[in-house]
Image (cartoon, rainbow, N blue to C red):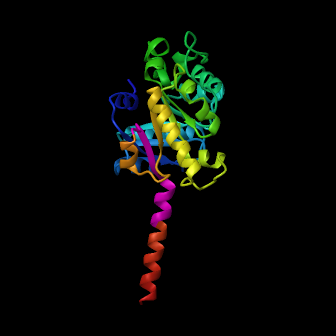
Amino acid sequence: MNPIKQRLQNCEFLTAGWVELGNPDVAEIMVRHGWNLIVIDGEHGIGDLENWVAVARAVEAAGGEVLLRVPDGSDTTLKRVLDRGFRSLIVPMVNTPAQAKAIAGHCRYPGLGTRGYAAPIVRASAYGARPDYARDESHDELLLFVQCEHPDAITGLAEIAATPGIDGIFLGPNDLSAALGHLERMDHADTQAAIAEVEAGAKKAGTMLATVLGAGRGWADLKGLGYNLAVGVNDVSFLVQSARQAAEMRDAELKGA
């Protein structure tokens, strides 16, 4: 079983950090210092599929687990990341039930979907060492979140959530706010109302709900609101904050010298 999926099904509230730089060493450092769940950002971060695999190997070797946010929900993208061993995915910009149905289909083998078959020779099956991978294990271990970040996705939320193969909704508050005409203003009343609508819709549908830290919500707030997964800190911010702090300390010391 996918440990992330199992923990979510056991009603744990999971917290994660982003890896944007595509660097295995940076990801390993994060795991060894308190962030054992890492989301690799394939939508906005640096790197390609093989970078993501290298990051995943480093995270797993350090005792962590990974989710991958793919850049898109195309058949080609999903087939390749699944074959390379990723089993926990976040797909961005899913605005309609038809998109959700297609994405779920791309992730599951015939009988349940349309995923292309090469099971015996791919990393996902341990290069054939898992003989039941295609028939049983691949579907059971898949964890699939689709991102709700547009008003159209809210309209179709119940149907998207009910799509076979879709495990949860990942709320993208920044893009949702922008789509509502309020770029970088997640505190706007329209955005806050839309976020509340997504939260209520997910609860009514009985589906998992995930999001990023922000929009006036911290870790404890999100847990209290019933979210299952929250992603907050990221490697770029760690580096930026540390660089700024060191520069400020340097300047203060030199000013007083």
Image position of 46 (left or right of 85): right
Tell me which residue sits at (65%, 23%) in the image: 98
Image position of 248 with respect to 243: above or below: below
Instruction: Give the image quarter of residue 106.
Output: top right
Q: Quadrant of the N terminus?
A: top left
Q: Percent from the top left, x then y, of residue 251? A: 47, 81
Which stretch did the figure color magenta? Answer: 226-242
143 vs 191: above or below? above
Asked whether residue 201 appears in the rendered view, the answer is yes
Name the residue located 60 percent from the left edge and 48 percent from the top edge: 177
Q: Is 252 inside the magenta-drawn segment?
A: no
> Residue 207 at x, y = what percent?
45, 28
- Of 231 and 161, nearer the camera is 161
User: Residue 11's quadrant in the figure?
Assistant: top left
Q: Position of residue 195 (x, y in %)?
A: 52, 43
- Tell me if residue 237 is in the magenta stretch: yes
**Total tally of numbered discs in the picture:** 0
Quarter occupied by the C terminus: bottom left
Residue at 52% of width from left, 19% of height from top? Answer: 164
Instruction: Name the outermost residue toward the top.
Output: 111
Front residue (pair 96, 1): 96
Image x and y of residue 193, in percent:
54, 45
